Amino acid sequence: MHLLSYPRESVSLDGTWQAIPDQYEMYDGYFEDFVDDDDDDNPAGFSPKSIYELGASEQEGMPVDFNVHDGYSVDVPASWGEEITEFRHYEGWVWFAKTFDWDADTAGDSSHLKFGAVNYRAEVWLNGERLGEHEGGFTPFSFDVTDELVDGENLLIVKVDNKRYDDGIPNASTDWFNFGGINRSVEVVSVPETYVRNYKLETELSEDSVDLQLDAWVENAVDDTEVTASFPKLDVSIELTADDDGVFTGEATLSRDDVTLWSPSDPQLYTVRVAADDDTIEDEVGLREVDVVDGDLLLNGEEIWLRGIALHEESAGKGRALNLEDVEERFEWITELGCNYARLAHYPHTEAMARKADEEGLILWEEIPAYWHINFGDEEIQELYRQQLRELIQRDWNRASVALWSIANETDHKDDTRNEVLPEMADYVRELDDTRLVTAACFVDETDDGIVLKDPLQEHLDVVGINQYYGWYYGDADDMEQFQENPDGTPVLISETGGGAKWGHHGDEDERWTEEFQAAIYRGQTDAIDGNDQIAGMAPWILFDFRAPMRQNDHQRGYNRKGLVDQHGRKKQAFHVLRGFYQEKRS
Ligand code: GCB
């Protein structure tokens, strides 16, 4: 179960670290194999150690490049290729080291080392003790370090490996840049003996009432541990009792008149306090329900059309390590466009995005990087798949903004194994959280009867995402007029559409790569889908230009140019076209 750290005080380990690239992977045991310790002929007197072992740096006769304190000074969080130009295209191992002071007197009963995200594999040692490893570049993980932390100076070593793997998620080829690094914050969270590890709030509406269910995962609870949840502003206090699995659970029913439900037009948040004996966490939550009924997408029982935009997590010169100002800037563009919805593609973005979306009233689609060619038949990959879903969902399941969990992007619907495994992943998501909608970005098919959805996965989804590029990769921008709608069928969101343009490049509407060409695609696409009864919203591709190694023509030079703004934030004409469409949709 994910350890909630956001609502807690913690000791930040962000700041300056040391980093040493180890392209030939020699600092983990290599020298130990090379030199026999007992060999009298060992001329250098080596007693080699791996880089993470205590004292490895101080050994007599060890090469100076073995010293973990002699690395490049880098900031954490950061993407290494953006910090050190020589690392720009580096893919491999980097050893990170941080020394920090710890005051055992002020610490709680147990302490946990928490990483927001490390891309892609991480292996961690504290004071020479191996804590464990983690795979997956975008989700949080933590280790209990109560026994490894010492009073005074501590040495933390993290081996980061950002190589791309065919058996990874994502696998080796994607249309985005592989930013290696400790891309999100590192912190130590100290808690009392009995503490709340996580909680989950579920809201269900009926005509007159708002039903709340709150589950809490409490560590080291004993028979007389008191666990409560309260919403001071709503005058609600719930006593939670342990179920057979040891999860503390409780319910409350409120009158609908007493609650302002969360929505994009009124993103009301309430403070919730979850307490177990001496431990209390405080969070801000919205109360709302998302649902699909008779083919309609509903928020709080009312139909809603999602005016969206898709975005990567990337900032020029910073890679994936966004700070709060970057998050603000993204919200300024999204608000200016008139969106009530965004697709956070193609992997979990920083938790700060969902928190900001809660405050601003933006509905979110969140996803894991199960993208293109995943080897669905491999059981280890399936396990990694579940792990990434779990780590995202347990992090964000209290965010009112998150309405959709997406399980895959553009996977092959003619692959039988995929068609067996993805429904299992949809079920797994529902096991973790059945209060949100399960979706995936799928392809359409062209037939003599028009454009149709043939993907068998649709039966297992609450909402179907469609990625289509009429007017750019194929066909005409308004071809979606031929989409064979089924008004009672599963609601459809256009999860991608768009085309490329280089900012400042102008010409005729039929000249590819010009702003005019891109703007014309947006006009054609929005005309074609407007009024279609099955389409419940859209999130065109994409808010801003992003790094994409496979895009190398004269207009691209390493960037996917489908952004409505370029990587420097300069708006293209299509931005205004979409904004105009959303203004009309709103009124
Ligand atoms: C897609 C992918 C997205 C690409 C985009 C494109 O369908 O889902 O990751 O970047 O197309 O630009 O072609």
Image (cartoon, rainbow, N blue to C red):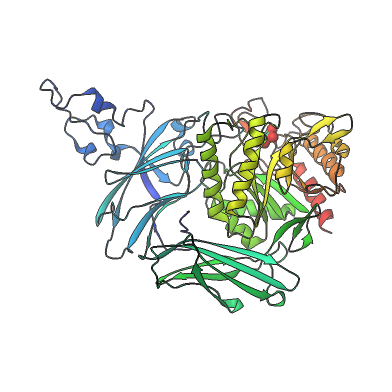
For image coordinates 71% across by 29% down, the residue present is 414
Can you name the residue that lies furthest to the front here?
244
Q: Looking at the rendering, in which quadrant would you find the C terminus?
A: bottom right
Nearest the viewer among 539 and 169 is 169
Can you name the residue that lies furthest to the left here?
40
Does residue 124 appear to the left or right of 531 in the view shown? Answer: left
Nearest the viewer among 424 and 178 is 424
Does residue 447 appear to the left or right of 65 in the view shown? Answer: right
| Residue 322, percent from left and from top | 53, 48
Q: Is residue 421 above or below residue 2?
A: above
Nearest the viewer among 521 and 114 is 114
Does residue 35 appear to the left or right of 230 in the view shown? Answer: left
Q: Quadrant of ligand 1?
A: top right
Nearest the viewer among 54 and 325 is 54
Asked if one can make out residue 495 in the rendered structure from this viewpoint, the answer is: no
| Residue 440, percent from left and from top | 68, 42
Q: Is residue 435 above or below residue 316?
A: below
Asked if one can make out residue 353 in the rendered structure from this viewpoint, the answer is: yes
Can you name the residue that lies furthest to the bottom here?
235
| Residue 455, percent from left and from top | 74, 36
| Residue 176, percent from left and from top | 59, 35
Can you name the residue that lies furthest to the top here?
41
